[in-house]
Amino acid sequence: MKVFTAYIEYDPDTRLYVGIVPGIPGAHTQGATLDELQRNLKEVLELCLEEQEDILEIMPQFVGIQQIEVAG
């Protein structure tokens, strides 16, 4: 079993959670709840891995997220 890291945001305009798995083209989806988003991300990841069997060999390694402060 492979574990992936997803980047998740909440869109107040649509009231949906939006998730993306960096490094895997097409691995993005949305859901009304975090549970729904997790199920949708799992499904889309399985589909992406079926279509792109070699993706794990070329996928970048997740390092982390940083917050950058700018004036404004």
Image (spheres, grey):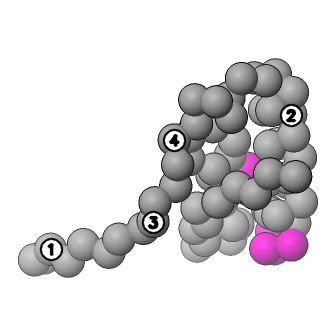
> Within the magenta stretch, is there residue 15?
no
Q: Which residue is mark 1?
A: 70
Asked which secondary structure carries label 1, the reply is loop
The residue that appears at 80% across and 43% down in the rendered structure is 45
Could you say which is closer to the camera, residue 45 or residue 55? 55
Residue type, numbered disc 1 = Val
Q: Quadrant of the C terminus?
A: bottom left
Q: Secondary structure at mark 2?
A: helix
In whole angstroms, how far apart are the C-alphas of marks 3 and 2? 25 Å
Alpha carbons under labels 1 and 2: distance apart: 38 Å
**In whole angstroms, how far apart are the C-alphas of marks 4 and 3?**
12 Å
Identity of the amino acid at label 2? Leu
Disc with the residue nearer the chain's start (2 vs 4) = 2
Front of the two marks 3 and 2: 3
In front: label 1 or label 3? 3
Q: In this view of the protein, which residue sits in the foreground, 48 or 3? A: 3
